[in-house]
Image (tube, helix red, strand yellow):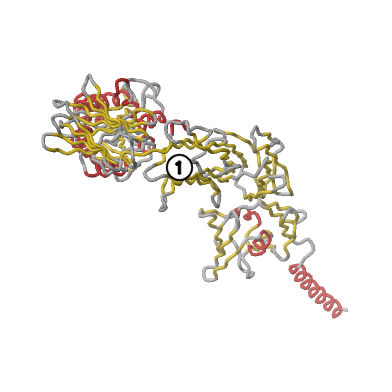
């Protein structure tokens, strides 16, 4: 019996060991990894192991289950887990992981003792996944977190319809077009739709309504119903909330020539505001103008008029979206986009000849002023009195900007060229001591020579922008308002410029509010030679900055040269710290077409600078420095180059820009 008891005990021990091994291999009630796949759940076999009583999940099994990739680096025992939203680096035995470039501390170190890298089940969340751990059923459920789509709204800005979709977290999407009926479809993945998102009817001739619904589990579908096919652009911004904006193209609905206009005119009608490029001329001499966010909706897309400068005009769709206007013109004609006539309903393009040059030279006892044009013109010279002037009208010619030419003659003080009427440019010679004149038209009709004497008169147009004003005080320190200092310096600079014969345009002359858009519009309408915007600096994060700094942005290198010269002269006059010249994205140097500089005279937040800014003599020095810098620039070769490039003429570079409307007064001025 004793031996029998021993035998039974040994058998029981052997059976117990066998049972433990069998349970470790696949025990009843072992952990299960269940992954969401396409709206259904799938169990991933042999993906969970029990380590010290805690479930660890195989990273490779997890990656396979959710469609991610896994790379293993044997030397360092590291794994790189890459999914649609996450790139994570995990190292065996190291609790610190790196997820999307940021360090993350895990609840437990990844384990690789079994030959497979595994992480604690709660740490699955660090990989950008949602995880539910049910200890009773021993099921680990993993799914992608779903964005909640909380908004699908519609807006119309100047006739351009946009649809905005918002989710509380970033999401993936795809967009496509369906026909019969026409509609745009946006599928948003790993998302759920809030009940508050309703169907929206749109008061537009093409975009009819926007509706949203759950297309299938995890997929929100937004449908935009259209009356006809219409192009669109999509812009996605990740974040919280994440935004998806769909902007529909405007439609080109009509284009025609207007023979009743003062100049040959092409009207391009659009249903809503459409951006367009500046006219360009290709190698074949065809004028090109692109409408990148417009769609051609025309019954007739080609015009072939009889007579006139337009030989033919066509509008065609561009591959990839947008439309292109192509116009074949008679030699010498240019396209002029009439910005002041363009609105939300279309673009107005006039076609006209241009003035190529206005030159003068001395002859025996006389001065010859030679005006050339890009094509034959029916020049009409005539005299004007009180004061005595010689004028010539140029019908069919467009003067892009007013200009003033210094002649260096005793009998001609200046030649002014401007747009007198919508279809007629006019050149006016202001006469001095000699009143007689004669004129000859060149045989090809492209030029006229006016013979008179000469006298030096010179001026240029400068726009001065005193920063802030009115309800916008700018920086305020110890009862000193930046707007007042800016205006005082600007007024002093204006006086210096006008005393030298310059034409000055101020964006404000007193303490009034002027919007930034109005300031840049005023500056561009003045067609200036240079623009200077005057400001004072201030900061709250550092009480120590002191000195002068200047900024430029557009028309590089011309604005850069202007800024460098003005800055150098101001620093030399003020003897403040030189904080250098930089390229800065400020409105008045970005939204203006002429060379422009923005000067920050000094720091109001600095006690020493502020005390100096209070001093009228110091402000006079600031104006003097700006005046010297402007003078150096307007007399430089760089300015000459800009004048030639901006006017597109080979005439005398000393032509002076100005506001064409100022040349259209009564009495032929």
Q: Which residue is mark 1?
A: 310
Image quadrant assignment for residue 504: top left
Q: Single out the residue that lies furthest toward the left.
A: 365
**Left or right: 375 as drawn, with respect to 257:** left
Task: Using the image, determine if residue 187 lies above or below residue 514.
Answer: below
Crowd around label 1: few <14 · some 14–19 · many ≥20 (10 Å): many
Q: Identify the residue shown where x is 64% and y is 61%.
A: 63
Query: What x and y, as percent, mark residue 25?
Result: 74, 69
Query: What x and y, as percent, mark residue 342?
Result: 47, 33
Q: Single out the residue that lies furthest toward the top.
A: 386
Query: What x and y, as percent, mark residue 428?
Result: 26, 29
| 445 vs 70, nearest the viewer | 445
**Left or right: 457 as drawn, with respect to 278:** left
| 471 vs 49, nearest the viewer | 471
Image quadrant assignment for residue 296: top right
Q: Quadrant location of the N terminus?
A: bottom right
**Left or right: 171 as drawn, with respect to 586:** right
Q: Single out the residue that lies furthest toward the front.
A: 443
Q: Is residue 577 visible?
A: no
| 625 vs 654, nearest the viewer | 654
Task: Using the image, determine if residue 205 lies above or below residue 30.
Answer: above
Task: Using the image, determine if residue 417 lies above or below residue 279.
Answer: above
Q: Quadrant location of the C terminus?
A: top left
State the SS at label 1: strand
Image quadrant assignment for residue 140: bottom right
Q: Is residue 257 visible?
A: yes
Query: What x and y, as percent, mark residue 272?
Result: 56, 35
* Tally of numbered tags: 1
Q: Single out the residue that lies furthest toward the right.
A: 1
């Amino acid at each position: 019996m004793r031996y029998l008891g021993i035998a039974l005990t040994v058998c029981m021990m052997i059976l117990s060991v066998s049972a433990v091994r069998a349970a470790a291999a696949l025990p009843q009630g072992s952990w299960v990894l269940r992954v969401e796949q396409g709206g259904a759940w799938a169990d991933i076999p042999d993906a969970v192991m029990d380590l010290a009583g805690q479930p660890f999940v195989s990273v490779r099994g997890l990656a396979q289950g959710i469609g991610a990739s896994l790379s293993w680096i044997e030397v360092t025992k590291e794994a790189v887990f890459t999914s649609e939203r996450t790139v994570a680096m995990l190292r065996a035995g190291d609790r610190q992981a790196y997820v999307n470039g940021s360090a993350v501390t895990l609840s437990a170190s990844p384990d690789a003792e079994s030959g497979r890298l595994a992480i604690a089940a709660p740490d699955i969340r660090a990989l950008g996944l949602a995880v539910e751990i049910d200890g009773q059923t021993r099921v680990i459920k993993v799914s992608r977190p779903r964005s909640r789509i909380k908004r699908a709204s519609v807006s119309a800005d100047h006739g351009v319809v946009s649809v905005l979709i918002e989710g509380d977290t970033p999401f993936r999407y795809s967009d496509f077009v369906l026909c019969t009926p026409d509609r745009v479809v946006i599928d948003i993945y790993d998302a759920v739709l809030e009940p508050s998102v309703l169907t929206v009817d749109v008061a537009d001739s093409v975009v009819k309504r926007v509706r949203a619904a759950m297309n299938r589990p995890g997929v929100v579908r937004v449908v935009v119903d259209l009356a006809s096919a219409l192009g669109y652009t999509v812009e996605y911004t990740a974040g919280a909330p994440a935004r998806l904006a769909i902007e529909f193209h405007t439609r080109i609905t009509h284009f025609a020539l207007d023979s009743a206009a003062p100049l040959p005119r092409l009207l391009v009608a659009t249903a809503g505001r459409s951006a367009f490029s500046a006219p360009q001329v290709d190698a074949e001499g065809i004028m090109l103008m692109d409408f990148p966010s417009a769609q051609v909706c025309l019954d007739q897309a080609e015009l072939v008029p009889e007579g006139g400068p337009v030989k033919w005009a066509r509008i065609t769709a561009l591959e990839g979206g947008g439309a292109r206007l192509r116009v074949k013109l008679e030699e010498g004609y240019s396209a002029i986009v009439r910005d002041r006539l363009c609105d939300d309903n279309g673009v107005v393009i006039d076609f006209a000849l241009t003035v190529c040059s206005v030159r003068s030279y001395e002859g025996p006892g006389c001065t010859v002023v030679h005006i050339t044009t890009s094509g034959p013109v029916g020049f009409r010279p005539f005299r004007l009195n009180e004061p005595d002037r010689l004028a010539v009208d140029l019908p069919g010619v467009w003067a892009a900007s007013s200009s003033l030419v210094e002649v260096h003659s005793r009998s001609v003080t200046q030649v002014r060229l401007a747009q007198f009427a919508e279809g007629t440019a006019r050149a006016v010679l202001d006469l001095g001591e000699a009143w007689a004149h004669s004129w000859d038209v060149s045989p090809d009709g492209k030029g006229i020579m006016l013979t008179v004497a000469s006298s030096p008169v010179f001026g240029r147009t400068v726009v001065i922008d005193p920063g802030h004003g009115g309800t916008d005080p700018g920086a305020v320190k110890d009862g000193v308002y930046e707007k007042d200092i800016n205006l005082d310096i600007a007024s002093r600079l204006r006086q210096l410029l006008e005393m030298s014969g310059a034409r000055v345009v101020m964006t404000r002359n007193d303490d009034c509010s002027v919007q930034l858009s109005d300031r840049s519009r005023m500056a561009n309408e003045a067609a200036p030679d240079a623009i200077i915007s005057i400001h004072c600096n201030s900061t709250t994060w550092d009480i120590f900055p002191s000195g002068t700094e200047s900024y430029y942005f557009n028309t590089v290198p011309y604005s850069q040269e202007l800024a460098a010269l003005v800055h150098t002269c101001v620093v030399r006059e003020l003897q403040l710290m030189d904080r250098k010249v930089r390229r800065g994205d400020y409105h008045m140097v970005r939204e203006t077409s002429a060379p422009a500089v923005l000067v920050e005279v000094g720091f109001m937040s600095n006690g020493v600078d502020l005390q100096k800014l209070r001093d009228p003599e110091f402000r006079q020095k600031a104006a003097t420095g700006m005046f010297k810098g402007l003078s150096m620039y307007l007399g430089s070769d760089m300015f000459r180059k800009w004048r030639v490039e901006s006017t597109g003429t080979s005439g005398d570079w000393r032509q002076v820009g100005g506001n064409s409307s100022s040349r259209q007064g009564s009495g032929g001025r």
